[in-house]
Image (cartoon, rainbow, N blue to C red):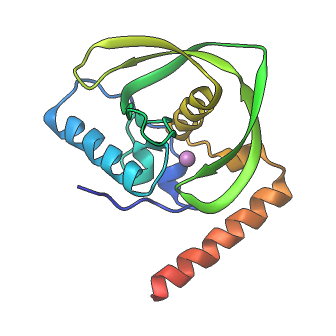
Amino acid sequence: MKRPILIHPDPRLKKVCAPVPDLSDDLRRLADDMLETMYDAPGIGLAAPQVGVTRRLIVLDCVKEEGEEPRPLVMFNPEVVASSDETNTYEEGCLSIPDQYAEVTRPKVVDVRWIDRDGNPQAETFDGLWATCVQHEIDHLNGKLFIDYLGAMRRQMITRRMQKLKREQARA
Ligand code: NI
């Protein structure tokens, strides 16, 4: 089932999310809903607070090539355990900040640990777009958005645009 995506600014997008203690059918359903919502948007990552659930859960799939197998990843309690000194700059966007993009510099390679959909611990090294995406999504769990990496003027301009968008949506 698709879920509505919160648009910035929203207090739920600024919260530090609580760890998931034990997996439950409800949490698995939430993960499946988030994947459906992400693919439908379409996007390459989504964090639970973006659908109003302040729990440490993200989903992502950065496979972009037409005809390539999709690779949906569900990560409960994801954690970056190591990151490279080498950095990478990507133009980032966010489903909670529609149609706004900006370059953000982050570590190029990260080692991430998480609990998968079946409750098994996983670890993997991510590079390139996957690394950027997983860091962007984990930031969401700490109440941080990609616009927080920009200068204050740019951030305020984008926030005002989003406030206007929300007013227009509320009237529609
Ligand atoms: Ni985002």
Q: Residue at x 42, y 35 (%)?
A: 58
Image coords of residue 17 (percent x, y):
44, 37
Q: Is residue 109 above or below residue 163?
A: above
- Quadrant that contains the N terminus: bottom left
Horizontally, residue 108 falls left or right of residue 167, namely right
Q: Residue at x 45, y 23 (%)?
A: 78
Q: Residue furthest front?
A: 67
- Which of 64 and 115 lies nearest the eye of the viewer? 64
Image coords of residue 72 (percent x, y):
36, 33
Horizontally, residue 104 falls left or right of residue 129, namely right
Q: Is there any visible trace of residue 121 in the rendered image?
A: yes
Q: Residue at x 34, y 44 (%)?
A: 35
Q: Quadrant of residue 89?
A: top right
Q: Residue at x 23, y 37 (%)?
A: 27
Q: Residue furthest left?
A: 25
Q: Is residue 138 above or below residue 93?
A: above
Q: Residue furthest bottom?
A: 171
Image coords of residue 5 (percent x, y):
42, 59
- Quadrant that contains the C terminus: bottom left
Q: Quadrant of residue 118?
A: top left
Image coords of residue 20 (percent x, y):
32, 28
Horizontally, residue 60 falls left or right of residue 135, namely left
